[in-house]
Image (cartoon, rainbow, N blue to C red):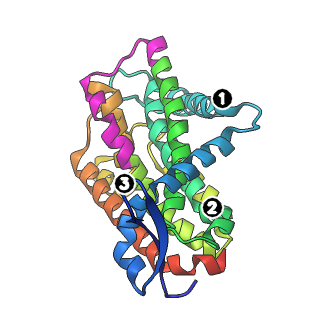
Amino acid sequence: MTNQANITSDLNQASPSNAERVIILEAGRTERNYWSDLWSYRELFAILAWRDVAVQYKQTVIGVAWAVVRPLLTMLIFTVVFSKMAKLPSEGTAPYPVMVMAGMLPWFLVSTVLSQAAGSLVTNANLISKVYFPRLIVPVASSIVALVDFMVTFVLLLGLMVVLGFFPDWRIIFLPFFVLLAILASLGPALVLTALNVRYRDFRFIVPFIVQFGMYVSPVGFASSVVPQEWRLLYSLNPIVGVIDGFRWCLLGGQSQLYMPGFLLSLGVVAFFLWLGIRTFRATEKTFADLV
């Protein structure tokens, strides 16, 4: 890759329906048009996202069922360990398995985005080294796999609620906002890890450790309200705390309350990591084709 930018634009020749793609070579054009290029390459985004979803489930033994088995087994283990053995309380009168599933729902979304995005550039090395397009498309497109798993797990949670006779109230209408927040909270660190993984391949071993460690320091198997009040604001520096608390606020209704100082702090941390992730990714993007 050189500092001279290659960019593909749509120019109408005879009529709007008779457009041709031409290559325009102009120094600095990529930087000026980077964000508009993301929209121009939306079809490539859709193709990569569909391919990643197809590859994830094609020729697997249990396929989509894995998105059910994993959270179900984890929920059972957490319920036994934290509820039966540690005797930790649930959120109000919400059944403990429902509370755990409401916390696992965003956590699996975040962890899957981190895992899929971190190795996405290396996986698409042939494409990156041959064709110009905004590289940000690759890790973002890989997050669509996490959304598919999320929808399967969400259906599992609804089924569990029906079995246990516990139903959300009107607050569930805010769930899409917290889904978006979970994706943004994961994309910031994911973009940093993606850029680092291109240069230092050792990060493919570090990412699973980060994901595993993050699950135990986040309130997945227990309510964040059990954290002592004097430590709760500091605990909210983990941005996933605010995301999980938001999901439980939506899904458990009046049984769960948002700790607003901690939630606002989590929003700030999410915004910071998203800025840092985009900045780091863009600063190293020009070297990706030479390194993958």
| 227 in relation to 164, above or below | below
Q: In the image, is residue 117 above or below residue 164?
A: below
Question: On the image, numbered disc 2 is attached to which residue?
Answer: 119
Residue 264 % position (x, y): 24, 53
Q: CA distance from mark 2 to mark 3?
A: 29 Å
User: Mark 3 or mark 1: which comes first in sequence?
Assistant: 1
Q: Which residue is mark 1?
A: 65
Inspect the magenta stretch and tell me whether residue 180 lies in it: yes
**Callout 3 crowding tier (Cα within 10 Å): few <14, some 14–19, many ≥20:** many
Is 131 in front, or is 290? Answer: 131
Dot label at residue 235: 3
Vertical order, 97 against 141 (above or below): above
Q: Position of residue 153 (x, y in %)?
A: 52, 31
**Of the residues shown, which amino acid type is indicated by label 3?**
Tyr
Magenta span: predominant SS is helix
| Residue at x 65%, y 42% (from the top left corner) | 54
